[in-house]
Amino acid sequence: MSVPALPPVAAFARLLPAADPAGTAALAARSLAGGLLPVGVMLATGALVDGVIRDLTGPAHGGTGGPGGPGGLPGLPGLLGAAGGALLALGALLLALQVAVPLLDAGVERLAHRVDVLLRDRLLTAVLTPPTIAHLEDPGLADELAMAGTVGTEKVQTPRALAALAGVAAARLLAVGAAVTLAVFAWWAPLPLIAAWTLSNVSYRQGVERLITSMEAATPGFRRARYLGEMALDGAAAKEVRLFGLGPWLAERLAAHWRAGTEQAWRRNPAQQALFAVSAAALAAAHVGVCALVALAAARGDIGLGEVTVYLQAVMGMAGFGWDPDAHYLVRLGVAPVPHTLRVAEAARGRRFALPGADRPPPGLRHGLELRAVTFGYPGADRPVLRGLDLRVPAGRSLAVVGENGCGKTTLLKLLCRFYDPGEGAVLADGTDLRDLDPAAWQRGIGAVFQDFGRYALPLRDNVAFGSPAHRADEAALARAAERAGLRDVLDGLPGGWDAVLSREFEGGVEPSGGQWQRIALARALLAVHGGARLLLLDEPTSGLDVRAEAAFYDRFLELTRGLTTVVVSHRFATVRRADHIVVLAGGRVSEQGSHAELVAAGGRYAEMFEAQAAPFREAGRA
Ligand SMILES: Nc1ncnc2c1ncn2[C@@H]1O[C@H](COP(=O)(O)OP(=O)(O)OP(=O)(O)O)[C@@H](O)[C@H]1O
């Protein structure tokens, strides 16, 4: 089922009651008050003018002749005079406008924030829902996500849009009241004004729609521009930007992307300009015509001054049928992201929320893992990375995967995590296809250190405890994970200990070195194991470690992985050779497998790679 393609304003309006029923009622009341009270003000002004004239001209002219008119007890209007009654009514209406509207505005503002939260929540749920991550690498989704938060270069502000919407709704209501009032003068009098305002609406609406559509079409370019802008600010890129003199290139590319994105949006549109001119002429003619008729009727004595006042105000009030450039633009801009959010949410609907809850026990792994005839290619790629791969990973044993750059080692680990599903074949855990398991529970049962592991600008405690949030306060478990990951020295040197924030971007924060970060990631994976994970995945776990730390790691490799089903990807044979079983990946399949000794003896690709790494050390030893 697809999202019914409601116009953006309608789609937005439909969300309001779900976000905050009371706030929606406040919005409706605010619109009613803002629309109807001014109609009352308009009528009361007419009555006031009439009243003043009657009071001044006395009973002979049909007036009350002032307070306590002739004969009998005066009523309140009598006491005050006709003008006094109208003045009272006018005062009451103006007071109501002054008090009710700001009061209701508070409710509207709360509604705006709740809608914001609702939209964000839907987006977040939609993005986190799939257990796999392929969707996050889809440029189409990245564009939708960008448009769900911004229109072109403008960040969307729901509160401003909603306040503008209340204003537009009130203006429309006032316009209806004004049209009805003017129809009392002549039933057809509102018609030319409605027609002219509608024409002007069309011309403005076309312009804004064109602007928003072209801004949306330019989103991929704006995303690139934003990326370049972030590059200029990003600490990691800052070094190379300076070293390689990339500044002018960055500035030029950034400007080019902005230009390309905005050019289309602001291009002149002669058809729209012509429509705009015609609507302006129609508006002028309609106003002059209707006002002239009102004046003529007054000159003939058909209507009094009070009526003239009311009808002229009604003519002005009918502007609410037209286009308020500021308010309408704000509304349209504010609701523009809604269809994108709904589309992203719709695409994810029906799949259960997949974030593994920390309280959910990870499943055991008793027999092991198997990849059966797995063929897998990344979405959009023209060639598969893995082609009919068969591989067994016995439970409780360690498996090392080696192979040339780009042969698919990391991809294999990602399939084991079910970040992607294979195109053909299956990944099985204890004989069950991963697709038939609860993805959240499965992922919860894995401790992993990827090459691009997370470096969180948070306290060290959180950086490690993310592996098993249930053990966040378990000092002994944290200390053991730190110890086993070789983090003890790092910890001793940190001024804040476990509470030191790992980023110089925050006051008092520290910046760990590359190798220290790697040990932190390892500690996190080991804490996950402590929390019950039964599968440990290590992707180049020692690439950032110094010689001593690396030696300590592989000395402890057997201890770290004992009893655990472990898959380690590494180019370092010092680590690889300690695994129970080793496979060489080539051409998307396992090309060789066995123990280190068996593979060296076989004299194949593994032996070649091992020799290439060992030879320089042997020669250095001889020298
Ligand atoms: N997210 C992705 N989307 C598209 N292609 C990808 C993605 N990740 C990796 N690839 C491609 O898949 C192939 C295998 O990548 P993978 O990272 O699995 O190789 P690897 O054996 O781990 O390499 P290395 O030894 O360099 O770490 C490469 O050609 C790579 O370009």
Image: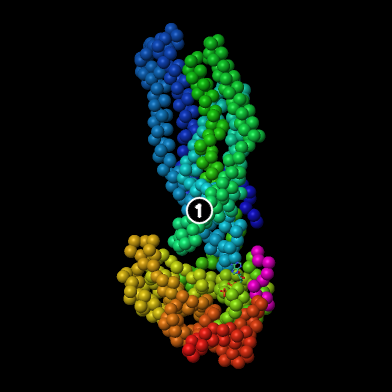
In this figure, which colouring scheme has been used for the structure? rainbow
- Residue 382 counted in the magenta span: yes
Pick whichever, 421 or 3, lies toward us. Answer: 421
In the visual, does 388 lie left or right of 568?
right
Tell me the residue that label 1 is attached to.
248
Residue at 63% over, 50% down: 4
Asked whether the viewer can see residue 190, the reply is no
Q: From what the image shows, is residue 414 above or below residue 554?
A: above
Residue at 35% over, 15% down: 67
Give ligand 1's quarter of the image.
bottom right
Q: Position of residue 491 (x, y in %)?
A: 35, 75
Tag 1 secondary structure: helix
Locate the N terminus and report the quarter of the image it occupies. bottom right
Which of the 4 image quadrants contains residue 383? bottom right
Asked whether the viewer can see residue 305, the reply is yes
Q: What is the magenta range?
A: 380-388
Q: From what the image shows, is residue 531 above or below residue 46?
A: below
Amino acid type, label 1: Pro
Q: Position of residue 560 (x, y in %)?
A: 46, 84
Pick whichever, 587 or 51, lies toward us. Answer: 587
Q: Position of residue 552 (x, y in %)?
A: 43, 84
Residue at 42% over, 33% down: 97
Q: Position of residue 380 (x, y in %)?
A: 65, 64
Please rate how many residues cluster around mark 1, counting C-alpha atoms within 10 Å: few if below 14, some from 14 to 19, many from 20.
few
Q: Which residue is the extreme one toward the left?
A: 495
Q: Main secondary structure of the magenta part?
A: loop
Q: Which residue is the extreme one toward the front?
A: 623
Pick whichever, 502 or 38, lies toward us. Answer: 502
- Residue 28 counted in the magenta span: no
Residue at 63% over, 37% down: 269
